[in-house]
C-alpha cells in the first residue's frame, strides 16, 4: 500500500528542480511533516551507513538529493530516481531528527503545531508529534502521538496519511520529551498555550466534530460485540526508545492493565448474570 502511494506521487517538471532538491521536496504538498536535513549531515557517509542496502540506485539517488546528478540523465531514469530519492531522504530524515540539531528543528515545528492537535476532547487540543509504528519502510504509515493521553492517531489529510512511518521512526516523540522534559504535558488540567495560534480549532468546530464522532463509537460497540470482548481486543500503544519501553511509563501501564483486567473480570461476571 505504501509502495503504491510513493509511486503515485508526481515527480515534477524540470523547472521545479531549479532550486535545490531538498527545498523543492519540503515545499511539495503533503511533506509538511518533514524538516530540513542539513547538507553536512547528508554528506557525512557515516550517517548513511547501511542505507545503500535499503535504496535501489543509492549513489544516483544521493546525487539527486545533494544536487550533484548529471544533467544528461534521461527523463525516464530521473523519474525513477526521484522515487528512490524520496525513500532515501525519508530514511535519512528518521536518523536526523533524533540528533540534537534535528530535535531542535522538530521542536520548532511542534511549537508551531505543524502536526495538528489531539482529537480527544479531554486532551484540550494538545499538540501532536509524528511517530512510526515500524522502522522498516513500506510497513506502517505515519501516526500522530499525543503526549497527554499517550495514544496515537491517524492524520486527517490523506496526503499525510500516505507518508511512511519509517521516515520518522519509533523513538522520535519520546526522545524529544526526554530531551525537553518541560514539554511533557500534564495528564489533567489546561494545556500550556503555544507561541502561535495556528492550528487551533474554535469551540464550534470542536463541538461539531465531537457530535459526529461520539455516535459512531457507541454504535460500533453495540453492533459488533459485547463490552468485554471489545475491551479484550483493544490494542494499546507502548512508547519505546530504540525498542525499549520507558521505565516510568512501563510501570504505569502495568498498573493500568492490572486495573483493566480486574474490570474485565467484573464485566464478564455481570454479563453471565444477565
Image (cartoon, rainbow, N blue to C red):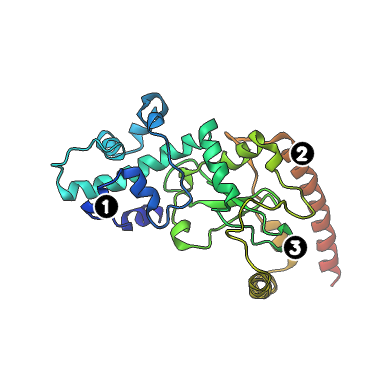
Residue 225 picture location, percent across and down: 68, 69
| Contact flag, marks 3 and 1 (Cβ < 8 Å) | no
**Circle 1 is placed at which residue position?**
16
As drawn, is 85 to the left or to the right of 123?
left
Q: Secondary structure at mark 1?
A: helix
| Contact flag, marks 2 and 3 (Cβ < 8 Å) | no
**Circle 2 is placed at which residue position?**
251
- From the viewer's perspective, is the residue at label 2 or at label 3 nearer? 2
| Contact flag, marks 2 and 1 (Cβ < 8 Å) | no
- From the viewer's perspective, is the residue at label 2 or at label 1 nearer? 1
Q: Secondary structure at mark 3?
A: helix
In the rendered view, tell whether residue 79 sits above or below residue 169.
below
**Circle 3 is placed at which residue position?**
228
Rate crowding at label 3 as few (under 14), some (14 to 19) or many (20 or more) other CA atoms within 10 Å: some
Q: Secondary structure at mark 2?
A: helix
Residue drawn 55% across the image and 37% down it = 104
Amino acid at each position: 500500500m505504501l509502495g503504491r502511494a510513493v509511486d503515485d506521487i508526481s515527480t515534477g517538471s524540470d523547472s521545479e528542480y531549479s532550486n535545490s532538491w531538498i527545498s523543492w521536496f519540503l515545499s511539495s504538498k503533503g511533506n509538511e511533516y518533514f524538516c530540513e536535513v542539513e547538507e553536512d549531515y547528508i554528506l557525512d557517509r557515516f550517517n548513511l551507513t547501511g542505507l545503500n542496502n535499503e535504496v535501489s540506485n543509492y549513489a544516483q539517488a544521493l546525487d539527486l538529493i545533494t544536487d550533484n546528478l548529471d544533467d544528461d540523465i534521461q527523463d525516464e531514469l530521473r523519474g525513477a530516481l526521484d522515487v528512490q530519492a524520496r525513500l532515501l531522504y525519508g530514511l535519512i530524515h528518521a536518523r536526523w531528527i533524533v540528533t540534537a540539531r534535528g530535535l531542535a528543528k522538530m521542536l520548532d515545528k511542534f511549537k508551531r503545531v505543524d502536526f495538528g492537535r489531539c482529537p480527544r476532547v479531554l486532551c484540550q487540543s494538545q499538540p501532536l508529534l509524528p511517530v512510526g509504528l515500524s522502522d522498516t519502510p513500506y510497513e506502517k504509515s505515519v501516526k500522530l502521538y499525543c503526549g497527554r493521553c499517550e495514544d496515537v492517531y491517524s492524520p486527517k489529510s490523506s496526503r499525510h496519511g500516505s507518508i511512511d512511518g519509517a521516515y520518522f521512526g519509533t523513538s522520535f516523540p519520546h526522545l524529544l520529551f526526554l530531551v525537553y522534559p518541560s514539554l511533557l504535558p500534564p495528564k489533567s488540567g489546561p494545556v500550556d498555550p503555544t507561541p502561535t495560534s495556528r492550528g487551533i480549532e474554535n469551540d464550534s468546530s470542536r463541538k461539531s466534530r465531537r457530535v459526529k464522532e461520539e455516535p459512531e463509537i457507541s454504535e460500533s460497540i453495540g453492533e459488533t460485540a459485547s463490552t468485554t470482548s471489545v475491551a479484550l481486543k483493544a490494542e494499546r500503544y507502548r512508547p519505546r526508545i530504540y525498542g525499549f519501553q520507558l521505565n516510568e511509563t512501563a510501570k504505569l501501564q502495568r498498573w493500568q492493565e492490572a486495573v483493566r483486567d480486574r474490570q474485565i473480570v467484573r464485566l464478564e461476571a455481570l454479563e453471565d448474570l444477565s
